[in-house]
Amino acid sequence: MTVRFGPKGHWSVLLAIFGLFAGLSLRAQDAEVAFATPEEKLTAAIEVLQQFDAGAAEVEVIVNLVEPAGKPKGKEWDSRPKLRGWQRAVKGRQDEVMGAFGPDEFKPQHLFENQSGFSGFVSRKGLEKLALHPRVASIEYSRPVKPHLAQGIPRMNAFPYRSTYGGTNVAIAIVDSGVDYTHPYLGGGALPNSKVIGGHDFGDSDTNAIPNGNAHGTACAGIAAGNIATNQGDYIGGVAPNAKLYALKITAGSATGSTDATIIAAWNWCVTHKNDNTNNPILVISTSFGGGRYTDMCDGLQTGYASAAANAVSAGITMLVSSGNEGYCDSLGTPACISSVIAVGAVFDAGYGSITYCIDSDSCAPKYSHSGCAPNRATDDVTAADKVAHYSNAAHFLGLLAPSHRTHTTDIVGAGGFAGGDYNLNFGGTSAAAPYAAGAVAALQSAARAILGHYLTPAEVRATLTSTGDLITDSKATQIIKPRVNVGRAIDSLLPPRLSVSRTNNRVVISWPTNNTAGYTLQWAHALPATTWSNVPAIPVIVGTNRYVTNNVPMGTKFYRLRN
């Protein structure tokens, strides 16, 4: 029997009889097997086949396995015994599959802790065996990804709230090129310190997430949660200066790029280590890397990413991912195209003249040939506060907008990094927008804990930031209208509404705005303590841009309360 792989059927493998019978035998014994054909398992691996045809000896792939039983749900992710039991089942499944391959067929790279899968370098022979293995659900190419490259805090209405709700009792994981935790506004000293309380280097497979000359992650960390800075020019600290940080380095050595599989491994780590510090759980992940182009949600094509993100969200972690800098008007990169994450695009925080930068030739923004750009396309952009940058990828499934470009933030200490000093005054791209939004989430979560007594779910975080943001129209793709994060309004939406009282003749009018506080009811009782409270009929009123509920209350000795 011959099975062909690839859209053109330009290579084939012989399906060995013993392999067929082995698969049938396993199916008879165990229901946890994949029933997809070998060709179906490779639908997301066309680039792997193309590289083999071009002469590559081995290619890095992501292997998604059929899940074992016992996967945690919701709060079960916070149960250490439940989590450890699931991880043992996942490890057993990984060992079972990898045990069938020799070193000339498959070399493991990342074993995903909380999802049934792994990555590694596969030979052509190994790929054929993977496609035939009954535990293998699908195989994907682990593509290279790249970083997505003035203070935006006032633009997001976050400045007045930092001293009260500045990320206390929340940790943000920065999945990037490492964080220079020796910087005075990122804790200073060794790891862990007062700011960066943990991390891991997935690029170099060690526990020290210090950057090797690549300051991208350090800049993102300073935006999200750098300590409040004084006398440092335009750097004033991060959006959530009281939040803690975890540094997850995904670049190898001094390299600037990474891979899909490495990001997935880092996301898995965050789920496992979410509650390492119970006073500061990981509730936010910021990722400013990506690549590719997708005109719709890509979960079906990016199973590894989709599974990792869904697990993190189920565990209570909000995922922020930069949308990409190609200037697309109808598509986002990956992993921004995953449905569980919030894709973040970029707006200018102020107007400071015209700028020129490179964009993709498929961007709908005005562009022209330029020798300094590859593929030789540049755009001239006139900056203005809250204008979406031409480079910011847009699509109907974009989640939020946040400030970007010429951001003043932390740099690697000393002569290394971007600027040869301790601060970078020109960090930008959607790489900056994602940590701005991540800091906003940390501030919102700290406010929720203080005001409501509990953290918000990722779905509630998304709904709150979306409903309270300032709507911005993308000038290059006018059909795309998305909310720019407004931290103050998001936090205010958690507070009980403020009552206004006025007297008209012999009646008292009690009212409150309900733009972001729907669901409250005014109740009255004759005396305190009261065993019975009665609802006061409400009359909705629209005044300007605000919606009020007005209650005409008869004069007399009564007590009133507002209940949600």
Image (cartoon, rainbow, N blue to C red):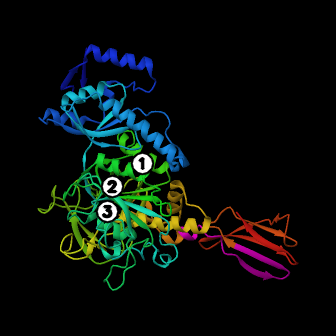
Give the residue type at disc 1: Ala
Give the residue type at disc 3: Ser
Give the residue type at disc 2: Cys
Mark 2 burial class by Cα count in 10 Å: few <14, some 14-19, many 20+: many
Instruction: Identify the residue shown where x is 39% and y is 39%.
Output: 300
> Where does label 3 land, which residue?
431
Asked whether disc 2 touches disc 1, contact meaning CB atoms under 8 Å apart, the reply is: no
Q: Earlier in the sequence, mark 2 or mark 1?
A: 1
Label 1: element kind: helix
Mark 1 burial class by Cα count in 10 Å: few <14, some 14-19, many 20+: many
Residue 306, position as x, y percentages in the image: 40, 44
Q: Is residue 365 above or below residue 42?
A: below
Q: Is residue 158 above or below residue 300?
A: below
Q: Is residue 234 above or below residue 51?
A: below
Can residue 7 be seen?
A: no
Instruction: Identify the residue shown where x is 74% and y is 71%.
Output: 550
Q: Earlier in the sequence, mark 2 or mark 3?
A: 2
Q: Earlier in the sequence, mark 1 or mark 3?
A: 1
Q: Which portion, as a residue range, is magenta?
A: 490-511
> Where does label 1 land, which residue?
309
